[in-house]
Image: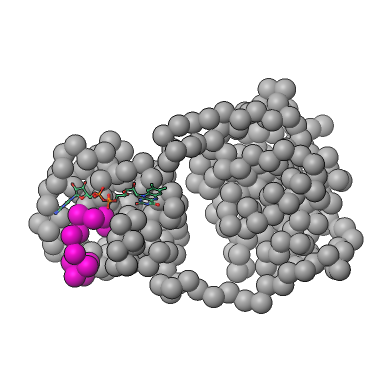
Amino acid sequence: MTTVLAVAEHRRGELRDVSLELVTAGRELAEAVDGDLHVAVVGGDVDRFAEALNREGVDTIHTVTEGEEFNHDVTLQAVEALAASLEPAVVLLPNSVDGLDYAPAAADALGWPLVTDAVGLEADDRLVATREMYGSKVATTVAVEFPAVVSIRPTEWPAAEGLGDAAVEAFEFDLDEGAVGTTVTGFEEAAGGDVDISEADVLVSIGRGIGDEDNLDLVFDLAEALGATVSSSRPIVDAGWLEKNRQVGQSGKTVTPEVYLAIGISGAVQHVAGMKGAKTIVAINTDPNAPIFDIADVGVVGDLFDVVPALIEQFS
Ligand SMILES: Cc1cc2nc3c(=O)[nH]c(=O)nc-3n(C[C@H](O)[C@H](O)[C@H](O)COP(=O)(O)OP(=O)(O)OC[C@H]3O[C@@H](n4cnc5c(N)ncnc54)[C@H](O)[C@@H]3O)c2cc1C
């Protein structure tokens, strides 16, 4: 039986959202190759993670108890051992900081092709992946022979939902301690404190339309009224008005809030790449032809300096 192996991701005791997206992508791919979906989780509270990963369509979950936080060498050895044991057609992992840390090494160690940042996956007699280029302006198709290592772009697949009845098995292998040259000593928050825009339900996002750093107070007042988090387009970060960890987009963060308010943001492809997965997009812009209105669910053509104070009054 052909196997697809998805390697879940966790950080600081929490399973990352992309892990359940991996399950969806893995399930689709397993169906396409008429195979089984196996999910592995390496390190940390594996039993709790396995419970959360036990979703419809998952056949087996492998728990690897070595390590706590992500460790390049441990994960690499575990994935190599899992691949040797399961002989999967595909190893799927997230196109994240951690995923990209070991994906090339895993592909190299296994001698398999590597496809990164896939936004679509199909299979014929080869694996066919869709990747985007030039700021999502061009979609390319990449076909590689099985078996392959593939990283998928976070937020491109919905999180798997229905509860499953997968077998949970402890996977044991001989960890070569001598080859573990890295140790996680702790975490240091990036400047900007612990603001994590990728976890926010409501984002008030500001763009160059705000005009001046002093006007940002208005945006923070709206965020407070809505119980929202402030994010921004890149020029606001480039100007040094907000910290880098608040930037949404291709070179910033990918976000999927329930509500995304794009205020004074034109909707450049590089920005849209990071927020198009928001459930409801509300755009406020003086320019009725701004591209952001093409993807907005609710559009307000107006001056933010009129509209935002009215919203604050409404929601305070
Ligand atoms: C390799 C690369 C990576 C990039 N990565 C990112 C990224 O990660 N994130 C990102 O955001 N950008 C990114 N960019 C930049 C991107 O191309 C755009 O330049 C940027 O998104 C524009 O930001 P903006 O919409 O705030 O500004 P602008 O495009 O200048 O738009 C400002 C908008 O505000 C409106 N406006 C002006 N005054 C008002 C007012 N009073 N009330 C209401 N509306 C008003 C205007 O009509 C306009 O639509 C990247 C570019 C490159 C080349």
Q: Quadrant of the N terminus?
A: top right
Rendered residue at 13%/62% (across/down): 309
Residue lying at the far left in this picture: please name it: 306
Q: Which residue is more in the foreground, 140 or 17?
A: 140
Residue 192: image x %, image y %? 40, 72
Q: Which residue is more in the foreground, 60 or 256?
A: 256
- 102 shown above or below 150: below
Side of 193 where 229 appears, left or right: left
Residue 241: image x %, image y %? 29, 67
Side of 196 where 210 appears, left or right: left
Side of 176 where 252 appears, left or right: left
- 126 shown above or below 151: above
Residue 12: image x %, image y %? 60, 69
Rendered residue at 33%/61% (across/down): 238
Looking at the rendering, the stretch of residues picked out in magenta corresponds to: 206-217
Q: Is residue 210 magenta?
A: yes
Q: Which residue is more in the foreground, 117 or 159?
A: 117
The answer to whether residue 218 of the structure is visible from this angle is no
Residue 225: image x %, image y %? 24, 66
- 11 shown above or below 138: below
Rendered residue at 43%/41% (across/down): 135
Q: Is residue 66 magenta?
A: no
Dominant SS in magenta: helix
Rendered residue at 65%/56% (across/down): 101
